[in-house]
């Protein structure tokens, strides 16, 4: 208030100014109100007849014209997802005198589950008036016949043909292609409503999910003149829908089948990558599941069975499965050792069968009792000598190991065009301090050197890292879609920038030579797969511990319960000098990488390269 | 007007007059508000598909709002003046809190959950912004100087941007116009007004750049509703059909076919005017507009009778903002303004807007009923 003492206030002048403004505001308000009234007169008197016509006798109905979903092909044009016509029972609620009663009768007649009624009720509510909503999709001949008899008693209920998504390869490619299913309520809130009027299904997972926009296309509409009963009289205006894009995947479904079958009784994952392009050739997660029931609405009992099954068929092992890399990490550790200059490739280390840290009693054991004797780097890789890598890891140090492995994509998502990918875990001193609030122990560096401990990878990550190693440090970006046909919206394939990891070519060749010996030398751990080929395969076996054996106890495969057996791993690429394909295999509880996992990779490589050379 | 105030001064107040004075209720304003509230129930009953539950909740809200109005009417306007800055400042802090919580919760966030009830700081800002500007300007002689205008402009822009960021374009417009109203009534020179309008027009491309995708879509739809008849243009096309088909006399109460068939979305909230226009026709619309103008007129009258600058500026700005409410809502429903989320004041279902609006009228009543009986 003290401030006002300094300014001179003239009440009379201020009052006049204020009244002037009140007057001006009143004029403005009246003018704008008159503007509103003029507009109302225009709508309600001048346009009345026009609008009354629209509203009452001859309503104009805007119906969505739903685009046809794009087809998904493999790299050779084999159909992985298509649309097949199917009969569905559909209701127009506005034409039905008593909806609840009708639903009850239909339920009894056709034996429809309560669940489907519930789904129908939800879908009905988001439809515009006088639009038809399906209650039953994919009707059988028997159901069709049953309804045909009583049809006259059910006004507003009719049989329609709709296109229904079909997956001819069923469980074989379910984790790649994914599936479409009814749009649920959570999705409804996120979706652009205008684009999905008339659409009942949406891609949930896999390619169907991640390329939903492209596959769906753009909804069109027609303005239809209707009479009082909402029967269409005349189409006034039509905007055609833009059909969904067809997708060509990099996947080779024949190779996929071979890999899937090769896993046989085991659960696991196989990922193969075309090294030159990054295109994923094989993406197997076994067991798969049949996606077709999800399209028409899977019964809750069947879904429950899938969810509770011990083999977890809904779990995408290739994308989300986390496994210790085991000995498959050794070539990378060896390369890190050379790059950081802590060892030369000729330098030999002695392996007595175990390793002890200075001033400690714990014995870190080698898989080979009695040890490998004195080994240089290539032999250490070929024979997978644990002690060599304990010592090497210890010399490099965990922080350098972390930084080096990170360049190959460990601990990070590969960025494949599928949703839900796991990043795995690449441990470091910082990570342990931040996440666990604990110090890093030297022993943990040792076991990181042989791919045990905290380090976790997905099979996809292993394949990517192997492909990157094979292409001599050029980072490979795995992806599944090769190209798209008639893309109507702004869909575009991701554009990856070229990254090259700075490593010395000589060091790389040393490592790769060791990996060739894994397959081609007499003492290699995967020598079983080197027959009938005129090129070289480079590989590395791995065994990932599922549980810890006690000190001084012996691991005996036959005595151990299947569930507790080690996971078998194998990474490989070929031809070693001009790599075209990289394969990573994880066989859950498969025991030894060399005997179970390597043959699967061998089969894939041989088939793929044979076809390549024939072309 | 003069005769009435003279009567106030010289005639001994009647018993009823004394009672009303005690209640601090302004009878003409109160009657108009009550009429509008009753009208609200009549329309809501029809628009909300005759759901009684909807009415019950609206009744509770309106009851609370009237109570708050009466309470505020009892407070001396000098108290409002004294706490203007504090209320404004805490409102801004709450807005920031809401924004931060929104950042954490990822997505639009307008509510502050206090456990027993949810509070929308943006609503409070609608009243505290004009309070703040009126308080600030009332310290100086009218018309305000350039420096004061700049500071006042700054004080208006802060809450406006914070609310626009929520994002709630409708409320941001209301807050900005409530502050701008104070400047206008304070005597902002016409030259300035023209300059500001010109500046805003040239800023339009920049504002466009900062708008959310859905806000842009609304503007595009407003300019060409037929572009997207299945989605965003749908509201406007349908509401025009509903209003136009109502004609001069309307289809009668409960006679709307468009909202009954749910051709018309949001029929009980932002688009309730379309239902009203369909049922009561042009006559009804003009009648409702007159009722609104009566309320605004009474409020402007109260402003002219106010006895100090703060009271005048606040009262006139609240009256002006109420008109902006009416104009923006009806304007968007009849298709002459873009669709921004502004309810039809006192009639639309839901929202805390009714509580805020009646709180504003409570302040107006307080200003009017706390006048000193003898002019100084």
Image: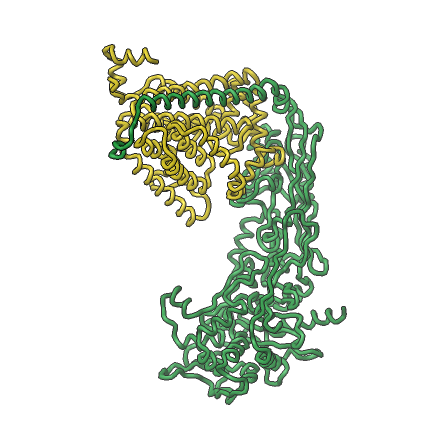
Chain colours: A green, B yellow
x, y percentage for residue B4?
32, 12
Label count reads: 0
- Please determine whether, in this image, residue B263 is positioned above or below residue A191: above
Which of A560/A484 is in front? Answer: A484
Which of A79/A398 is in front? Answer: A398
Can residue A311 be seen from the camera position used here? no
Would residue B5 be found to the left or right of residue A71 on screen?
Answer: left
Which of B84/B43 is in front? Answer: B84
Would residue B365 be found to the left or right of residue B240 on screen?
Answer: left
x, y percentage for residue B174?
43, 32
Can residue A445 be seen from the camera position used here? yes
- Please determine whether, in this image, residue B205 is positioned above or below residue A305: above
Which of B148/B232 is in front? Answer: B148
Would residue B111 be found to the left or right of residue A52 on screen?
Answer: left
x, y percentage for residue B163?
43, 40
x, y percentage for residue B126?
39, 33
Q: Which residue lies furthest to the right in this view?
A: A614
Q: Quadrant of residue A442?
A: bottom left
The residue that appears at 60% across and 47% down in the rendered structure is A202
Quadrant for the C terminus of chain A in the image: bottom right
Quadrant for the N terminus of chain A in the image: top left
């Amino acid at each position: 208030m003290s401030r006002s003492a300094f300014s001179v206030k003239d009440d009379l002048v201020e009052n006049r100014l204020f009244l002037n403004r009140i007057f001006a505001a009143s004029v403005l308000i009246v003018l704008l109100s008159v503007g509103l009234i003029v507009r109302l007169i225009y709508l309600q008197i001048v346009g009345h007849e026009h609008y009354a016509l629209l509203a009452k006798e001859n309503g104009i109905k805007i119906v969505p014209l739903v685009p046809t979903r794009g087809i998904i092909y493999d790299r050779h044009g084999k159909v992985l997802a298509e649309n097949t016509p199917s009969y569905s029972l559909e209701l127009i609620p506005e034409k039905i005198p008593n909806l609840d009663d009708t639903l009850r009768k239909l339920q009894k007649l056709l034996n429809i589950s309560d669940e489907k009624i519930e789904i129908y009720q939800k879908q009905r509510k988001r439809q515009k008036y006088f639009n038809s909503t399906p209650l039953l999709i994919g009707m059988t001949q028997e159901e069709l016949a049953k309804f045909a008899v009583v049809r006259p008693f059910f006004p507003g209920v009719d049989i329609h043909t709709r296109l229904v998504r079909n997956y001819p390869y069923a469980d074989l490619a379910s984790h790649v292609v994914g599936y479409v299913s009814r749009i649920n309520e959570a999705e409804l809130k996120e979706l652009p409503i205008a684009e999905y009027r008339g659409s009942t299904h949406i891609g949930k997972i896999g390619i169907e999910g991640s390329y939903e926009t492209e596959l769906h296309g753009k909804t069109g509409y027609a303005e239809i003149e209707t009479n009082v009963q909402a029967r269409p009289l005349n189409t006034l205006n039509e905007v055609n829908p833009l059909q969904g894009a067809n997708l060509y995947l990099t996947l080779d479904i024949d190779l996929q089948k071979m890999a899937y079958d090769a896993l046989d009784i085991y659960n696991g994952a196989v990922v193969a990558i075309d090294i030159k392009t990054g295109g994923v050739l094989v993406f197997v997660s076994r067991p798969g599941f049949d996606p077709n029931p999800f399209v028409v609405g899977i019964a809750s009992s069947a879904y429950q069975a899938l969810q509770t099954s011990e083999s977890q068929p809904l779990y995408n092992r290739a994308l989300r499965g986390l496994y210790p890399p085991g000995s498959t990490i050794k070539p990378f550790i060896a390369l890190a050792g050379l790059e950081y200059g802590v060892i030369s490739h000729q330098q030999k280390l002695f392996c007595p069968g175990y390793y002890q840290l200075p001033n400690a009693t714990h014995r870190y054991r080698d898989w080979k009792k009695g040890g490998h004797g004195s080994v240089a780097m290539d032999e250490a890789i070929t024979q997978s000598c644990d002690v060599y890598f304990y010592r090497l890891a210890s010399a490099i140090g965990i922080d350098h190991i972390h930084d080096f492995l990170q360049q190959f994509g460990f601990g990070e998502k590969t960025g494949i065009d599928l949703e839900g990918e796991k990043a795995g875990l690449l441990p470091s001193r910082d990570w342990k301090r931040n996440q666990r609030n604990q110090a890093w122990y030297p022993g943990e560096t040792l076991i990181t050197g042989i791919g045990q401990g905290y380090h976790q990878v997905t099979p996809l990550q292993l394949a990517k890292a192997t492909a990157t190693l094979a292409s001599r440090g050029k980072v490979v970006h795995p992806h599944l879609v090769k190209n798209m046909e008639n893309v109507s919206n702004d869909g575009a394939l991701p554009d990856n920038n070229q990254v090259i990891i700075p490593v010395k070519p000589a060091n790389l060749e040393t490592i790769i030579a060791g990996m060739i010996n894994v397959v081609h030398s007499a003492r290699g751990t995967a020598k079983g797969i080197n027959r009938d080929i005129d090129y070289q395969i480079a590989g590395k076996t791995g065994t990932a511990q599922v549980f810890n054996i006690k000190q001084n106890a012996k691991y005996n495969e036959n005595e151990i319960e299947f569930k507790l057996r080690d996971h078998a791993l194998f990474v490989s690429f070929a031809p070693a000098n001009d790599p075209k394909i990289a394969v990573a295999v994880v066989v859950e509880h498969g025991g030894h990488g060399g005997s179970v996992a390597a043959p699967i990779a061998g089969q894939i490589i041989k088939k793929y390269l044979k076809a390549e050379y024939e072309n | 007007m003069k005769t009435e105030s003279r009567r106030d001064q010289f005639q001994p107040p009647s018993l009823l007059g004394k009672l009303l004075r005690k209640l601090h209720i302004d009878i003409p304003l109160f009657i108009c508000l009550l009429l509008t509230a009753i009208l609200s129930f009549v329309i809501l009953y029809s628009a909300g598909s005759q759901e009684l539950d909807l009415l019950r909740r609206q009744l509770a809200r309106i009851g609370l709002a009237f109570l708050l109005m009466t309470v505020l009417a009892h407070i001396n306007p000098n108290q409002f003046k004294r706490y203007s800055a504090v209320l404004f400042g805490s409102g801004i802090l709450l807005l920031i809190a809401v924004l931060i919580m929104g950042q954490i919760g990822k997505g639009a966030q307008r509510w502050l959950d206090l456990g027993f009830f949810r509070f929308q700081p943006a609503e409070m800002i609608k009243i505290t912004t004009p309070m703040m500007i009126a308080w600030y300007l009332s310290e100086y002689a009218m018309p305000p100087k350039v420096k004061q205008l700049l500071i006042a402009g700054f004080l208006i822009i802060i809450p406006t941007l914070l609310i626009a960021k929520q994002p709630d374009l409708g409320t941001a417009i209301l807050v900005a116009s409530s502050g701008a109203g104070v400047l206008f009534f304070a005597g902002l020179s016409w030259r300035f007004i023209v300059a500001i309008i010109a500046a805003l027009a040239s800023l339009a491309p920049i504002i466009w750049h900062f708008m959310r995708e859905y806000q842009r879509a609304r503007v595009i739809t407003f300019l060409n509703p037929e572009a997207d008849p299945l989605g965003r243009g749908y509201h406007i096309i349908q509401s025009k059909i509903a209003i136009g088909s109502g004609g001069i006399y309307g289809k009668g109460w409960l006679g709307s076919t468009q909202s009954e068939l749910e051709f018309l979305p949001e029929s009980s909230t932002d688009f309730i005017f379309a239902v009203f226009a369909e049922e009561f026709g042009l006559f009804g619309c003009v009648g409702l507009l007159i009722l609104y103008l009566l309320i605004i007129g009474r409020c402007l009258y109260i402003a002219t009778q106010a006895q100090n600058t703060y009271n005048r500026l606040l009262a006139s700005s609240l009256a002006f903002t109420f008109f902006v409410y009416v104009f923006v809502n009806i304007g968007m429903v009849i298709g002459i303004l873009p669709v921004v989320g502004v309810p039809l004041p006192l009639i639309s279902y839901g929202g805390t807007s009714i509580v805020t609006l009646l709180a504003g009228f409570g302040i107006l009543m307080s200003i009017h009923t706390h006048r000193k009986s003898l002019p100084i």
